[in-house]
């Protein structure tokens, strides 16, 4: 006598089938519903040209703008951009589904970046770094040591600044059995540079000396650390310059008690959020930190598109508050404003007459505004090819004649020629 399959198994099989069918069909349904919504709004506004413009975008991926397409409704244009370009649009549908699936099955190692990403025990996502001694020597250690030698011959002090990452060396909170090369790579850079006679500032040491919670400085949705780290690192740099290079800098400039913090709760959706969506990650709180003491600066910025100069307070010159209009990954550039090829901040209430040249990448986004308070002039340059405007580094150093040079780079280094 044959026994039929149990109803429970049939229901489970049906549930699995429906789940994967939904995964396959939901992007198409999202596009169809969103397109219908836009079409209805276009019809309601009576703009006969709108449906044709949207159709052209469907088939040619033409980027709509007020200048190129006569869409006179801002609301309609905003909906179109949400559908085709914005966070949550159809181009993110699959990544959001991927994030939901990873959460459902409890995955704490996900694909992404070069070697994947780990989700720490506190919910923070970090890039998985595989230590590569040869690459670190070629891209970071040897170029930094060579630059230090050239500056020493000119009598210009030089210090290498390690970037601060989210992964705490003392308590990394990694998944059980996981290994990561972030901190051992930083240890190698610091040790080999010091062996070559190059001074190194290690923000991790400053953190632990002050008994500061490293994990509190990590964004859960982005690989950059929180803006509070900029104030902390600026204080560590100022302390080094005061003790080793004779800079006159008031320690209280970097006392967090002298700053006002306005926090936007569950507001920031960093780079990781766009890769995995709200099912896997929750938005971060985002702080806007401004001095409570008087400030006055003139800031000149330079990109490949041109230059801009403005004078005013810390808030008016070193923060781009328009970034609050969009809480996506570029919100971190509320501090400083952008990855500028050259950023010059002249402090009219400076504690000394010193000029600092900072060579950096995006990990210094929150450092620059606070470090600008430590000197008369801070010249910051991003030498990565996509942003570079400064020309040859030796010519820049000759022209600027800085009183100190600071180099901060991630594991990929930068072009120091």
Image (cartoon, rainbow, N blue to C red):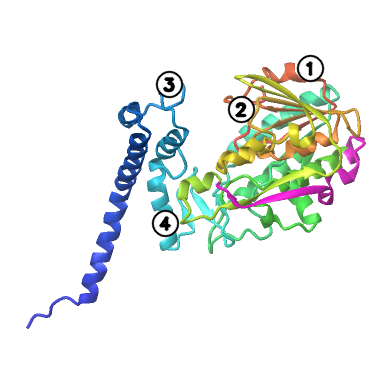
Q: Nearer the viewer, residue 348 or 303?
A: 348
- Looking at the rendered structure, the secondary structure element under dot 4 is helix
Of residues 53 and 234, the one drawn nearer to the viewer in this rendering: 53
Mark 3 lies on residue: 68
Does the magenta-highlighted stretch encompass residue 252? yes
Is residue 182 highlighted in magenta?
no
Mark 3 or mark 1, earlier in chain: 3
The x, y position of residue 70, in whole percent, is 41, 23
Answer whether labels 3 and 1 touch (C-beta < 8 Å): no
Label 1 packing within 10 angstroms: few (<14), some (14-19), many (20+) = few
Q: Which residue is mark 2?
A: 384
Instruction: Judge whether 345 appears above or below 7 on screen.
Output: above
Of labels 4 and 1, earlier in sequence is 4
Q: Are marks 2 and 3 in contact (CB under 8 Å)?
A: no
Instruction: Name which residue lies at 33% across and 39% down.
Output: 40
Q: Earlier in the sequence, mark 4 or mark 2?
A: 4
Q: Kindly report the distance in space between the C-alpha atoms of the residues bearing marks 2 and 1.
A: 20 Å
CA–CA distance in space, label 2 to label 3: 32 Å
Q: Residue 296 at what x, y percent from top left?
A: 83, 31
Per the model, the C-alpha gap separating discs 3 and 1 is 46 Å
The residue at 64%/32% (across/down) is: 338
Quadrant occupied by the C terminus: top right
**Residue at the disc numbered 4:** 100
The residue mark sitting in front, 3 or 4, is 3
Mark 2 vs mark 3: which is more N-terminal? 3
Tell me where residue 327 appears, x and y as whole percent: 57, 44
- Left or right, 333 with respect to 146, comes to left
Write down the residue under mark 1.
398
Q: Is residue 272 above or below residue 323?
A: below
**Does the rendering let one see residue 197?**
no
Q: Position of residue 51 (x, y in %)?
A: 32, 31
Which region shows up in magenta?
Answer: 242-269
């Amino acid at each position: 006598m044959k026994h039929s399959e149990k109803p429970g198994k049939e229901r489970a099989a049906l549930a699995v089938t429906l789940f994967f069918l939904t995964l396959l069909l939901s992007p198409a349904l999202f596009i169809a519903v969103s397109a219908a919504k836009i079409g209805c709004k276009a019809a309601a506004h009576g703009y006969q040209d709108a449906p044709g413009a949207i159709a052209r975008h469907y088939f040619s991926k033409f980027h709509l703008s007020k200048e190129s397409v006569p869409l006179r409704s801002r609301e309609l244009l905003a909906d179109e951009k949400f559908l085709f370009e914005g966070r949550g649009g159809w181009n993110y549908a699959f990544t959001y589904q991927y994030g939901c699936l990873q959460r459902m099955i409890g995955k704490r190692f996900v694909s992404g970046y070069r070697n994947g990403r780990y989700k720490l025990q506190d919910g923070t996502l970090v890039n998985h770094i595989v230590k590569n001694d040869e690459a670190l020597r070629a891209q970071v250690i040897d170029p930094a040591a060579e630059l230090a030698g050239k500056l020493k011959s000119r009598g210009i002090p030089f210090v290498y600044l390690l970037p601060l990452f989210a992964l705490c060396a003392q308590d990394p909170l990694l998944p059980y059995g996981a290994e990561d090369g972030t901190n051992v790579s930083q240890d190698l850079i610091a040790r080999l540079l010091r062996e070559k006679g190059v001074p190194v500032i290690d923000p991790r040491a400053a953190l632990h000396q002050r008994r500061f919670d490293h994990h509190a400085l990590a964004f859960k949705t982005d690989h950059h650390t929180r803006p509070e780290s900029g104030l902390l690192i600026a204080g560590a740099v100022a302390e080094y310059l005061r003790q080793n290079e004779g800079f006159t800098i008031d320690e209280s400039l970097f006392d967090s008690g002298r700053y006002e913090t306005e926090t936007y709760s569950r507001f920031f959706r960093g780079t990781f959020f766009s890769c995995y969506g709200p099912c896997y990650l929750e938005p971060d709180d985002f702080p806007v930190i401004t001095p409570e003491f008087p400030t006055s600066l003139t800031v000149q910025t330079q990109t490949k598109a041109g230059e801009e100069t403005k004078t005013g307070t810390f808030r008016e010159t070193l923060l781009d508050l328009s970034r609050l209009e969009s809480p996506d990954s570029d919100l971190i550039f509320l501090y400083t404003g952008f990855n500028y090829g050259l950023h010059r901040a002249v402090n009219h209430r400076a504690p000394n007459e010193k000029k600092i040249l900072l060579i950096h990448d995006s990990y210094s986004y929150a450092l620059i505004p606070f470090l600008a308070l430590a000197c008369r002039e801070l010249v910051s340059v991003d030498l990565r090819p996509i942003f570079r405007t400064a020309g040859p580094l030796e010519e820049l150093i000759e022209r600027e004649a800085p009183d100190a040079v600071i180099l901060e780079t991630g594991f990929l280094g930068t072009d120091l020629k």
